[in-house]
Image (tube, helix red, strand yellow):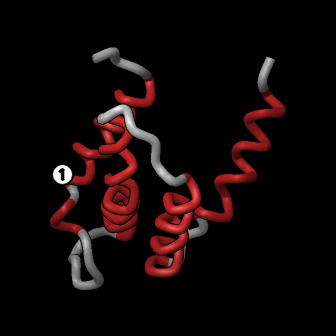
């Protein structure tokens, strides 16, 4: 199996999800940033597993997962991602 940048990042997401599993849910007693990190990792862990297995995943479903985190915790990840991609494309050499 070849190691890619995407697989390294996917591995990190799955590990972060396991480390922060105790901070999921509305009753979790933790700083909001920790709860957000836990929910982001949980929202994308299936996609991370797909990357590790060399399989594709539905990008729109991943965006909807970010939207669910936004709805639950008042964040704006789903809205911010396209803007970030546009900004980064403008910085490409």
Residues 70 and 29: in front is 70
Quadrant (top left, top right, bottom left, bottom right) of the N terminus:
top left
Residue 84: x, y in percent?
70, 46
**x and y percentages locating residue 23 in the rendered image:** 22, 68
Query: Taking 37 as reference, is 16 above or below it?
Result: above
Q: Residue at x 26, y 47 (%)?
A: 16
| Location of mark 1 (residue) | 19
On screen, residue 38 versus residue 86, left or right, reads: left
Coordinates of residue 64 in the picture (x, y in percent): 53, 68
Q: Which residue, as the protein is rendered here, is positioned at the far right?
A: 90
Q: Residues within 10 Å of mark 1 (few under 14, many from 20)?
A: few
Asked whether 28 or 50 is in front, the reply is 50
Q: Is residue 27 left or right of residue 67?
A: left
Residue at 78% across, 24% down: 92
Instruction: Tell me the quarter of the picture where residue 60 sits.
Output: bottom right
Q: Which residue reaches farthest bottom?
A: 27
Above or below: residue 76 compared with residue 48: below
Q: How many marks?
A: 1
Q: Secondary structure at mark 1?
A: helix
Q: Nearer the viewer, residue 34 or 52?
A: 52
Q: Is residue 23 above or below residue 92?
A: below
Q: Is residue 21 left or right of residue 52?
A: left
User: Taking 85 as reference, is 59 left or right?
Assistant: left
Q: Residue 45's x, y, as percent?
A: 32, 53
Taking the spot 67% from the left edge, 64% from the top edge, the residue there is 79
Residue found 38% across the figure and 62% down from its top: 43
Q: Residue lying farthest front?
A: 55
User: Which quarter shows the C terminus?
Assistant: top right
């Amino acid at each position: 199996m070849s190691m890619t940048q995407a697989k390294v990042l996917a591995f990190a997401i799955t590990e972060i999800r396991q480390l922060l599993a105790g901070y999921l849910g509305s009753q979790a007693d933790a700083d909001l940033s920790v709860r957000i990190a836990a929910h982001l990792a949980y929202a994308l862990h299936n996609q991370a597993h797909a990357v590790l297995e060399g399989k594709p995943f539905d990008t729109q479903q991943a965006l909807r997962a970010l939207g669910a985190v936004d709805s639950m915790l008042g964040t704006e990840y789903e809205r911010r991602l396209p803007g970030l991609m546009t900004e980064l494309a403008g910085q490409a050499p």
